[in-house]
Amino acid sequence: MRNAVTIAGTGSYLPEKVMTNDDLSKIVDTNDEWIFSRTGIRERRIAAEGEFTSHLATKAAEKAIEDSGIAAEDIDLIIVATITPDTLTPATACYVQENIGAKKAVAFDISAACSGFLYAMKIAKRMIEGGASTNALIIGAEKLSAFVNWTDRTTCVLFGDGAGAAVLRKSEEGEGEIIATDIGTDGAQTHLLNIPGGGSACPTTVKNAGEGLAALAMSGQEVFKHAVRRMKTSANTVIERAGLQPEDIALVIPHQANVRIIDAIADRLAVPNDRVFVNLHKYGNTSAAAIAIALDEANHTGKIKRGDKIVMVAFGAGMTWAAAAIEW
Ligand code: UT7
């Protein structure tokens, strides 16, 4: 019997508030020309006060569930990939479970930074294949605006808030499937991209509260080099496992961090730019949410159709990387 897993529905949610590069130039010493030419970002979304990661995740999840045609009460697994949870404990997935009414679902978070949504996809796929889940909801959701140092121009211009989700279930005859997945980690590079404060290594205290330690810190150029190398290798791994040639790939959905990284990946994979999905000019880098949002936009704007082969590839703090080859 066929034991394949398919994506039955997708959804995404972006907060209403738009912050443009010009808005940022009023906060830190920067300008639209620098930000756009170095990154490809024009604007990003910022969650409202009182709007948390779980709220963004819930809205994306509700759309994905509706799109899938599966009832929320039939979801039995919820994985939220995030580095910006509502609370250190419980997991953001627990709030989502309650919000969507998926009473019988087991719910937990994973922390794999920008690779998180594809990590979640691999875990859910394996759980469905192994019989531990029937209908899985995977979500990438981030409120990065709460973990950005708004006085540091080298990082605050890069990130944004948002969420994307997908419902996974067994694939029936004639439907698409997740053909191949790849995930990897290099713990020797933890120093290149992290949030140093707010955890057990450096808890936020009355004394250090003003030092901005619970904010993203990054060695941009080093991360850039690792990103290109790891994403190329990971994408090629799933392309080979799926038996694809560059011309077979209808769309590459790369992590949305920097358009120069995306161009370098497209070049190395020999896929023309018009078959590479880019939306970071609108949202900036939304970490674990980025590929999930992009997949939903590609799905609902007709960029991908039944039978298309698509490759998703991500890279993030850890360092982590991940890729998936899918028949839609
Ligand atoms: O999602 C996880 C993965 N993350 C990534 O993939 C990020 C990877 N890294 C990058 O995307 C790029 O390295 C950045 C966009 C972060 C930075 O671009 P860059 O071309 O590597 O710039 P840089 O760090 O070498 O900085 C160049 C100059 C510096 O000035 P000097 O030293 O040349 O005088 C910076 O101080 O640009 C300056 N600079 C800025 N100027 C205006 C840095 N940030 C800004 C800014 N506005 N926002």
Image (cartoon, rainbow, N blue to C red):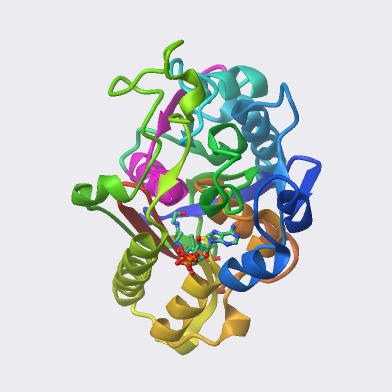
Location of residue 194 in the rendering, given as x and y in whole percent from the top left corner: 37, 41
Q: Nearer the viewer, residue 274 or 88?
A: 88
Is 155 included in the stretch rendered in magenta?
no
Quadrant where the C terminus sits is bottom right
At x 72%, y 64%, the residue is 32
Of all residues, the one furthest to the left in this rendering is 188
Position of 15 compared to 116: left or right? right
Q: State the image quarter where residue 219 is shown.
A: bottom left
Of all residues, the one furthest to the front in this rendering is 29
Location of residue 321 in the rendering, given as x and y in whole percent from the top left corner: 34, 56
What main secondary structure does the magenta stretch of the protein show?
helix
Looking at the picture, does residue 71 appear above or below residue 34? above
> Magenta stretch?
103-129
Is 117 included in the stretch rendered in magenta?
yes
Tell me if residue 187 can be seen.
Answer: yes
At x 66%, y 43%, the residue is 64
Location of residue 244 in the rendering, given as x and y in whole percent from the top left corner: 39, 81
Position of 85 compared to 302: left or right? left
At x 58%, y 67%, the residue is 39
Looking at the picture, does residue 210 appear above or below residue 178? above
Q: State the image quarter where residue 220 is shown.
A: bottom left
